[in-house]
Image (spheres, rainbow, N blue to C red):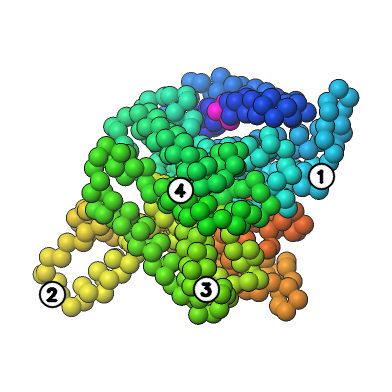
Amino acid sequence: MVEWLRTIGRDLGRMLQALSGMLFVSLSIPLVWREYYAIPGLLLSGLITFSLGIGLAKLCRNAVEPGKLHGMMIAASGWFLIALFGSLPFYFIAWTVALDPALISAPPMTETLAVFKHPINGVFESMSGFTGTGLTMTDDESVLPHTLQWWRSFIEWVGGVGVIVLTTAILARPGSGSLTLYESEARSKKIHPSIVSTVQTIWWIFLLFTFLSILLLWLAGMPIWDAINHAMTGLATGGFSITDNSIGTYDSVAIDFALIPVMMLGSIAFPIHYLILQGDLKNLYTDLQTRWVFGFFGGGTIVLTGMLFFNQTYESFFQAFRYGVFQFVSAASCTGFQTAGSLGNEWSAEAQLIVSFGMVVGAAAGSTVGGIKLIRLATLTKGTWYRITNVFYPKSALRPFKLDGRVLTDAETAQEFEEAAIIAFLWVVFLVLGMFVLLVTLPIGADGYSLQNVMFEVASAQGNVGLSSGITGAAMPSVIKVTFLFNMWIGRLEIVPVLVLLRSLLRGTEVYR
């Protein structure tokens, strides 16, 4: 076997082993809820995944440590593979109910569950879950088996932190190889010098916040099963719900406002959470990204609330504020919970564009969110202003460029600005390509969807948000499902690793020469 394939195969095997562990752990859910018909599907999914994972890991066990290029290819192919195998429970459970074999008391088939008899719908749901997007093929999540409600929430919860972070935490392997994979999952800062200690600390923080979020939602009046699921998907900024109308089902001011801090917790980088938990509270205002999170969320809320109030979308200022703050935080945190009904039909084009802007930008790098990330917006904004004002100074003037508490050299400034510009450019390119597919596939105009609906939906998929203007559903054409699968995939990995993988597959091993 070619050496670089062995390196990739070994780590893909490790990721599949971690996924099989998730499947086996989830066997407790059908036992608790007495959904015994779901056990064979979960068990078969776990055995298939574990067998392939252990086989790959053993076959490639003596491979060399991954370099930066290997890391990007492992991250891109691994996330796609995890989404593919993570779809098996949807497929197997749906067909178990459809066939209703003897000795298994399967419930009647529902239209919601029946959509997963088609493999592409299960892969879509799995990719949406793991990438923390939250767009769904279901039309009524409340009638899904508790086992699948849990699986949807569980994969979003794990995907929020990262599949590679989970793999590194469970199958601890110290060394530069794990660091390379950690960085390939769109992360850069470590909490500890050791990468294994870093990912384990991240998980402890995440578990603590999950427990606190469950408690907060339960105290706000949400039933305990609902609180568990929504705390997991809210903190992971994923947005899957177990109700038919997302958070709007509860029509509760207390629950709406309880979820806002949960979504904001998921929007702040884990290293900052760690420092704050250690008592270093000044990072709430000294850290650049954290300041921008509060500023961006606050500014967007003010603008959106003003639009909703003056456009008379809601009867009172409080209603405009309630829905405005929730939907902007949900969009900018890339969560995708919805309280305002159909945004595509009830909100003005200007309000939809403000929400779309929040989805495109996202929040802090190193958190659970998608989007371009605020650090890149800060880099582009400060870098552009730096370049413009440089014209007014003589060439001999020494003007240091400061970013996130660092003083950068001219070379470092150019590199930071270039990286941010490349990601932003690629983001817009694939946003436009996705919009083009929808525009030529869907009915557009008075009898169909508007341009802002299309832009909103593609931005939601690529930003890993999950808010919908009404386009996403099991009935949409397969070409749009495939397009959104690609948008969600590249959005979670910040595009570049996927492009590296595709280029390598097209050009073979030539890329390593």
Q: Which residue is mark 2?
A: 394
Which of pointers 3 and 1 indicates the residue nearer the eye? 3
Image marks 1 and 2: residues in contact by CB distance under 8 Å:
no
Instruction: Measure how far apart labels 1 and 4 are at the Cα level.
Output: 32 Å
Residue 253 as seen in the image, left or right of residue 385: right
Q: Which residue is mark 3?
A: 316
Mark 3 or mark 4: which comes first in sequence? 4
Instruction: Measure how far apart labels 2 and 4 are at the Cα level.
Output: 49 Å
Residue name at image x 64 percent, y 54 percent: 249
* Secondary structure type for disc 4: helix
Residue 19 lies in the magenta stretch: yes
Residue name at image x 59 percent, y 72 percent: 347
Residue 128 lies in the magenta stretch: no
Mark 3 or mark 2: which comes first in sequence? 3
Instruction: Measure how far apart labels 3 and 1 are at the Cα level.
Output: 39 Å
Return the residue nearer the eye: 455 or 423: 455
What's the residue type where badge 4 is placed? Val
Picture coordinates of residue 372 (x, y %)? 44, 58
The quadrant of the image that shows the C terminus is: top left
**In this orientation, does residue 394 appear?**
yes
Q: Residues within 10 Å of mark 4 (few under 14, many from 20)?
A: many
What's the residue type where badge 2 is placed? Pro
What's the residue type where badge 1 is placed? Thr
Image marks 3 and 2: residues in contact by CB distance under 8 Å:
no
Magenta segment boundaries in residue numbering:
16-20
Q: Residues within 10 Å of mark 3 (few under 14, many from 20)?
A: few
Q: Which residue is mark 1?
A: 110
The dot on residue 262 is 4
Return the residue nearer the eye: 181 or 24: 24
Which of pointers 1 and 2 indicates the residue nearer the eye? 1
Residue name at image x 63 percent, y 69 percent: 344
